Every structure is written in C-alpha cells, then in structure tokens.
Amino acid sequence: MGSQVLLILIAVVGGIAITVQGQMMGVIDRQLGTLESVFLTYALGTAIVSLLVLAVRGGNLGQWQQLPWWTLTSGLVGLVIVSSIGFSVARLGAVSAFTLIIASQCVIAALIDHFGLFGAEVRAINWQKLAGIATLLFGVWLTIR
C-alpha cells in the first residue's frame, strides 16, 4: 500500500509541476514569444540535467543505441508539448488550456493502453474507463464554453 501512495504522490507532484511550468511559460510566451519560451525552458532544463548526468558519471547513456529508434523522437514530442502548453496557456488561460490538455491525454492514454501502443502493457478499455472519459469530456465542455 505504501508504494501505491508514493506513486500517487509522484504523479500529483508531476501534475502540479506541469501546471506551474505552464503558467511560467505562458508569461515568457507573452513577453518574448513561443520559440523563445521553448528555448529558455529546454536550455535551462538541459543544463540542469547535464549536471545531474555528469554527477552520476553518465548513468546508462552508453546504452542508448539499444533503444528502439522511435523512442529517440521523444525530444521532438517534448518540443510539441512544451510549445503547446506555453502557447495555449498564454492565450486560453491555465484552466481552459490544461482542461483540454488533460482530457486529450486521458483519451490518447486509454487508446495507448487498450492497444498496447509504444510498448505499453495492454490494459483494456472497460465501461468504467469509458464513463470516466465521458465525464471528463463533459467537464471539458463545461469548463471551456
């Protein structure tokens, strides 16, 4: 039970961090522009993670060639994520932007789980998940209308 609580807390902290980062990027986006916002976010993040990798003497980076080729496009996907967050928060506001972002994440995550895409363990969509997604989509409608 303790490990489940830890996993939940880590997910919650991640959600909080995404929201706070989105608001920060929205401010940068409004003042400097979307590309500049993404550049600053990635440049500073790269500097920090580079120091962490150096601190652990490279970790497992020597094994990167063994990864499936398509996993190496995650940086490009990250650029889409960061760009869309900064752009949409600056223009829609945090609540509307994140409501749309979270709802789309849940729908796509359900499909990824259901079909086992991208190496995911298959977790079939059941009526409870469908009801949750429908409720979520109703919440999106209420939030952005």
Image (cartoon, rainbow, N blue to C red):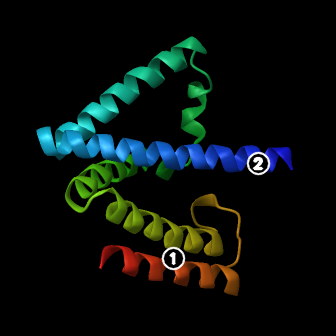
Residue 126, visible in the rendered structure: no
Where does the C terminus fall, quadrant-wise? bottom left
Residue 10 visible somewhere in the drawing: yes
Q: Residue furthest right?
A: 1
Q: Can you say whether 97 is above or below 73 in the image?
A: below
Q: Can you tell which quarter of the image residue 41 is in?
A: top left
How many angstroms separate mark 1 from mark 2 (CA)? 23 Å
**Nearer-the-camera pick, 48 or 70:** 48
Q: Position of residue 122 (x, y in %)?
A: 70, 69
- Specify the amino acid type for callout 2: Val
4 left or right, relative to 131: right
Location of residue 79 with respect to 45 vertically, above or below: below
Q: Residues within 10 Å of mark 1 (few under 14, many from 20)?
A: some
Q: Which residue is mark 2?
A: 5
Q: Position of residue 29 (x, y in %)?
A: 19, 44
Residue ID at (46%, 77%):
139
- Measured from the top left, where is residue 144 in percent x and y? 32, 74
Kind of residue at badge 1: Leu
> Tag 2: Cα neighbours inside 10 Å, few (<14), some, or many (≥20)?
few
| Dot 2: element | helix
